[in-house]
Amino acid sequence: MEEIYRVRKIEGIKEIRVRVPGSKSITNRALLLAALSNKRCTLRGVLFSDDSRGFLDCLMKLGFHVEIQESEQEVTIQGEGGKIPNRSGEIDVRSAGTAARFLTVMLAFAGGDYELTASPQMCRRPMQPLLDLLIEAGVEITYRGESGHFPFHMSSHGLLMEEVSIDTGISSQFASALMMSGVILKGGLKVRLSGDRMEGAYIKLTFNIMKQFGIPISCEENGYKVPAMENFGLTEYQIEPDVSGACYFYAMAPLLKTNVIVKNVHMDCLQGDIKFLEVLKNIGCDLEEKSEGVMIDGRNLEQYTGSTLSMKDFSDQTMTMAALAPFATSPTLIKNIGHIRMQESDRLIATLTELKRMGISCSEVPEEDGLIIYPGEVSEAEVETYEDHRMAMAFTLIGLKTGGISIKNPGCCKKTFENYFQIIDDLIAKSGRGC
């Protein structure tokens, strides 16, 4: 029987104080860079989820020495200076796009013979542009299913690559993968970028984390120059809280007319989704930087208007914005998000489908590469989540406002935020008026 979470309405909650897990995006980048370095590195504030556990499992199967203290949110990795301890083997990247792209490039650049498998969901996600580049550089790829997708066998011996061009339009993870593992190539790597996300938030995140790990990566016209380095790394690294996860709670400020602080989230963080907090400020919430974390206050906000905004650089919050849109006083137009069609689900179509299931008028806007959502009265509905954690978490917000919403397969949140629904239950209990 399919699991269903029935969302109860929250009323009269004056304030929300929560702590969210570590950033998935930073966790998986830090895991890769620690393994590539020649240092013994302890990562603190690590996210433990399906994605990060999959990444850790792959590193251990490749022979890296990994010490895990989950209760302390710590992982210690002994870097091998760009070498892979096991030069052959089989790894399963599960549903993690970061592990899929990052580890594929690392193994290709380091060399060896590997069988790479993934979940059915990840097998549907695009890999071909990245794999085509590797094949052109001399890597042998034998597909076990559909061409250009997982699963496949990879044999890499004597790869030739000094400069590469990659389109960021499909996934910025391709560029990040090349940038990080470029450090282990003998001559380094020039990564030329094209497409509409050349200066995207996740590429900037990769650049900044590489700098923190001691890699003097430099900006060049339309791309980056990654130097070859045998000696780099850190002995300790602190991972920021996950701003993507924090945004679901910050969105409760205007939705539930409450005051929200997510502990240890600050405006100077590395993550692009921090831009969503500016959106909340622009619709009328108060934003204040406090020592314990950013505060978003919606208690004095009687109503808010819809927005017209580009979410290209923080598109993971498209569904969060969509959850606010039915309760605005005017339409909400979200632009430049076509790439979300190729993520854990076709998020653009999934968002429209589930809003319509609730009786909300909305439609795709092809000329804006986006969608428009009109204010309306929400009807009772069971929300399909499409095995997509962000669909589950974002559409829960609507139920907290109206009641009458159920979330199918809430367990999909384990991908990045294992205790999300436990926190929601705690908030409902705290309000004392969940119904």
Image (tube, rainbow, N blue to C red):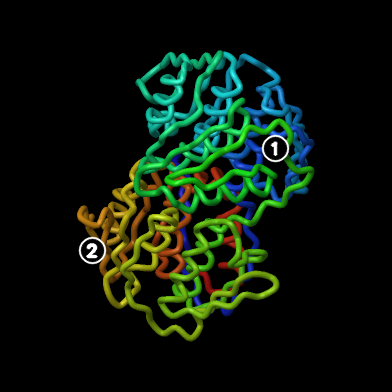
Whether residue 435 is visible here, answered yes or no, is no
Amino acid on which the number 1 mark rests in the picture = Ala
Q: Name the N-terminal-most of marks 2 and 1.
A: 1
Disc 1 packing (10 Å; few <14; some 14–19; many ≥20): many
Residue type marked 2: Ser
- Give the CA separation, mark 2 to mark 1: 48 Å
Q: What residue is at 39 percent from the left and 68 percent from the top?
A: 324
Image x and y of residue 404, in percent = 39, 63
Instruction: Tell me the residue that label 2 is attached to.
Output: 361
The residue sitting at 64% across, 44% down in the picture is: 216
Q: Residue at x 76, y 40 (%)?
A: 41
Where does residue 429 sit, x and y in percent of width and height? Answer: 60, 68
From what the image shows, is residue 67 above or below residue 315?
above
- In-image side of 281 versus 322 (left or right): right
Q: Which mark is residue 34?
A: 1
Which residue occupies 42% across, 66% down?
A: 403
Task: Classify the position of the N terminus by image quarter.
Answer: top left
Provide the secondary structure element on which disc 2 rests: loop
Residue 364 visible in the snapshot:
yes
| Horizontal side, residue 136 vs residue 28: left or right | left
Q: x and y percent of residue 340 in the render?
A: 36, 47
The answer to whether residue 208 is above or below residue 402 is above
Q: For this rendering, which residue is in front, 154 or 94? A: 154
List x then y, in percent, for residue 116: 52, 21
Query: Closer to us: mark 2 or mark 1?
Result: 1
Front residue of 362/153: it is 153
**Mark 2 crowd level (few <14, some 14–19, many ≥20, 10 Å Cα):** some
In depth, the one of 357 and 95 nearer the eye is 95
